[in-house]
């Protein structure tokens, strides 16, 4: 079986967020244990597995995502990576529909080569600042919001961009504060810098200390910052070491996430199910 590594939310290799992509034959997914073993072997934040569905249904491909430790309900960058493989190999064109645990997702190729994902927007609810989170994160929150179940994070607003960039959190201590992890964010310092807000994402409860660029987190960041800044269309910079840009557009209860992708590895998986 062909297996690929695709850098997502970037236009150059060795940036953005790498995802494993394995396109399977038609029929059911292999055993969950085998899927998890492949994802653990890949040791990327997510590996995506997809197989084609019969024509005429509500989706074209079934899609699942695994971290090195567990399966997750929603993953933006590995969905973008899967759509990139489908389009770059000529397997599909235009819009592709995925059936996933979080519902039907679509990915549409743009003329400039970027791909736009249509995901459910996260429902945000402000909560009291949990005891110990400032110490675990290494910065005092301005506000803390709970995200929807499919995201499973706390969104933590910090004072400014510099604070977000300087974070050196106690990853183990963060694990006590949410289902998946913490999204730390602040407004961009410089107007005209090419992005409107910055973020960093720490997910110790699914085996990811810091995720390079997180599409699912932007389903929460987009409504949060669109409300704050008064604009439905924004650009977020995830300020990890690899870095990446996510263009977001709020459309009612949906969020459009747009970014590029580059295939960096195209190989053969020898240990099949």
Image (spheres, rainbow, N blue to C red):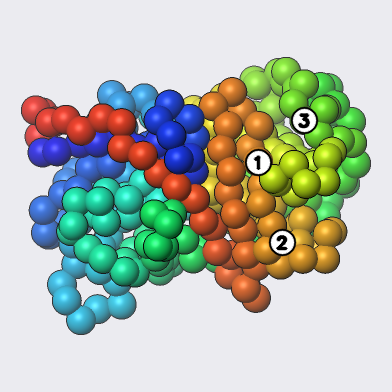
Residue 179 point in image, percent of width and height: 61, 42
CA distance separating discs 1 and 2: 15 Å
Identify residue for label 3.
Answer: 164
Does 72 sit left or right of 223 as displayed? left
Residue 192 point in image, percent of width and height: 78, 46
Rendered position, 197 above or below 233: above
CA distance separating discs 1 and 3: 11 Å
Say which of 79 and 37 sits in front: 79
Identify residue for label 1.
Answer: 237
Packing grade of label 1 (10 A; few <14, some 14-19, many >=20) is: many
Q: Quadrant of residue 254?
A: bottom right
CA distance separating discs 2 and 3: 19 Å
Residue 167 point in image, percent of width and height: 75, 22
Does 58 sit left or right of 198 as displayed? left
**Residue 152 shows up from this direction:** no
Residue 261 point in image, percent of width and height: 40, 44
């Amino acid at each position: 079986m062909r297996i690929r590594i695709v850098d997502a939310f970037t236009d150059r290799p060795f940036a953005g967020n790498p995802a494993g992509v394995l396109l399977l034959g038609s029929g059911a997914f292999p055993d969950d244990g085998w899927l998890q073993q492949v994802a653990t072997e890949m040791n990327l934040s997510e590996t995506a597995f997809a197989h084609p569905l019969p024509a005429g249904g509500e989706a074209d491909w079934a899609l699942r995502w695994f971290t090195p430790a567990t399966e997750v309900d929603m993953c933006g960058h590995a969905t973008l990576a899967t759509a990139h493989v489908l389009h770059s190999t000529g397997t599909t064109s235009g819009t592709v529909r995925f059936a996933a645990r979080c519902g039907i997702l679509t990915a549409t190729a743009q003329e400039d080569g970027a791909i736009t994902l249509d995901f459910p927007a996260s429902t945000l609810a402000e909560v009291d600042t949990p005891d110990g989170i400032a110490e675990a994160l290494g910065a005092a929150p301005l506000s803390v919001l709970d995200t929807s179940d499919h995201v499973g994070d706390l969104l933590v607003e910090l004072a400014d961009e510099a604070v977000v960039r300087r974070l050196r959190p106690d990853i183990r201590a963060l694990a006590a504060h949410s289902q998946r992890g913490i999204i730390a964010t602040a407004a961009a310092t410089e107007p005209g810098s090419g992005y409107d807000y910055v973020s960093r994402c720490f997910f110790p409860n699914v085996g990811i200390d810091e995720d390079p660029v997180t599409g699912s987190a932007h389903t929460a960041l987009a409504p949060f910052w669109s409300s704050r800044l008064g604009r439905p269309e924004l650009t977020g910079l995830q300020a990890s070491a690899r870095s990446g840009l996510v263009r977001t557009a709020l459309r009612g209860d949906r969020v459009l996430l747009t970014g590029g992708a580059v295939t960096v590895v195209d190989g053969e998986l020898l240990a099949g199910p």
